[in-house]
Image: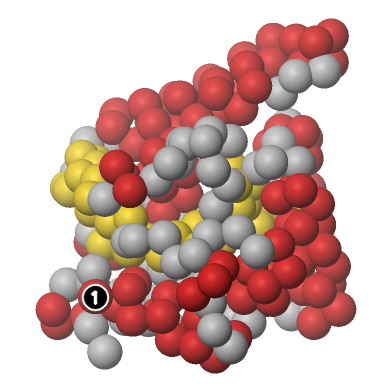
């Protein structure tokens, strides 16, 4: 999988970047990256089962809020989301050659998890991305869970939802904690489930704590029974 991705990066740099520059359209580069993620995961022997994807209207803009249990979560989840999505990414990854440039071109949002002011800046950047018509995908715990159980949620994504007034879609990822656990580099073939829950409309948000509780309950409901709260 990693070899495939390594081979794909020069392709993105040599063809995707010039095409994006000439056409001022990132669609080809974005689709190339999503295709590479999709194929790379399956090369590793990982089967992806989706539930509830039919609930998502491709014509609408959403904030997708997901749990996070493995480094494999983004390449498993992002290619499934209809239309283009932005995502909040650890700031240090933007320093990686080629990869950092691709992420900037894709309007991904850098975030410093240890800096509160930088976190507020990331929310502002995410607002700009959504105003462009992009979806936003956020791993609401802010970091990976060691055992697959939910960690406390960060509040920034919920400020973003209140600001932008777009529907929130909770996502439950399960199985990546077995396929590629935290602190392990190797990937073991297996099946991963990505469940898209019912969208929560802005009119149903309620107070911020109420929205947090609704998202948490939805994500928790999709976890294996032994990992639920």
* Residue farthest front in this picture: 203
Query: Which quarter of the figure is the C terminus placed in?
Result: bottom left
Residue name at image x 63 percent, y 17 percent = 28
* Residue farthest left in this picture: 225
Between 137 and 227, which is closer to the camera in this rendering?
A: 137
Q: Which residue is mark 1?
A: 221
Between 217 and 21, which is closer to the camera in this rendering?
A: 217
Residue name at image x 39 percent, y 31 percent = 38
Point out residue 139 in the picture as x, y percentages from the top left corner: 52, 65
Between 37 and 86, which is closer to the camera in this rendering?
A: 86
Q: Left or right: where does residue 227 sit relative to residue 103?
A: left
SS label for mark 1: helix
Query: Which quarter of the figure is the N terminus placed in?
Result: top left
Report the colour scheme: secondary structure
Residue name at image x 28 percent, y 32 percent = 42
Q: Left or right: where does residue 126 sit relative to residue 62?
A: right
Point out residue 66 in the picture as x, y percentages from the top left corner: 44, 64
Q: Left or right: where does residue 78 sit relative to residue 69?
A: right
Q: Left or right: where does residue 105 sit relative to residue 227?
A: right
Q: Indicate whether 48 appears above or below 227.
A: above
Q: Indicate whether 149 appears above or below 88.
A: below
């Amino acid at each position: 999988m990693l070899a495939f991705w390594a081979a794909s990066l020069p392709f993105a740099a040599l063809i995707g970047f010039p095409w994006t520059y000439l056409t001022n359209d990132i669609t080809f580069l974005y689709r190339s990256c999503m295709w590479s993620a999709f194929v790379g995961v399956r090369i590793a022997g990982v089967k992806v089962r989706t539930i509830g994807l039919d609930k998502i209207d491709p014509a609408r803009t959403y904030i997708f809020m997901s749990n996070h249990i493995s480094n494999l979560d983004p390449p498993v989840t992002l290619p499934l989301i209809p239309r283009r999505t932005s995502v909040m990414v650890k700031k240090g990854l933007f320093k990686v050659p080629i990869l950092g440039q691709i992420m900037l071109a894709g309007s991904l949002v850098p975030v410093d998890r240890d800096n509160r002011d930088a976190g507020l800046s990331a929310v502002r950047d995410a607002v700009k991305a959504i105003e462009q018509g992009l979806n936003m995908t956020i791993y609401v715990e802010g970091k990976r869970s060691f055992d697959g159980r939910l960690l406390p949620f960060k509040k920034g994504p919920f400020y973003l939802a209140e600001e932008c007034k777009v529907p929130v879609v909770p996502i439950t990822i399960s199985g990546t904690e077995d396929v590629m656990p935290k602190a392990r580099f190797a990937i073991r073939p297996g099946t991963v489930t990505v469940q898209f829950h019912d969208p929560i409309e802005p009119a149903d948000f309620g107070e911020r704590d109420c929205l947090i509780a609704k998202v948490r309950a939805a994500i928790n409901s999709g976890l294996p029974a032994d990992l639920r709260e």
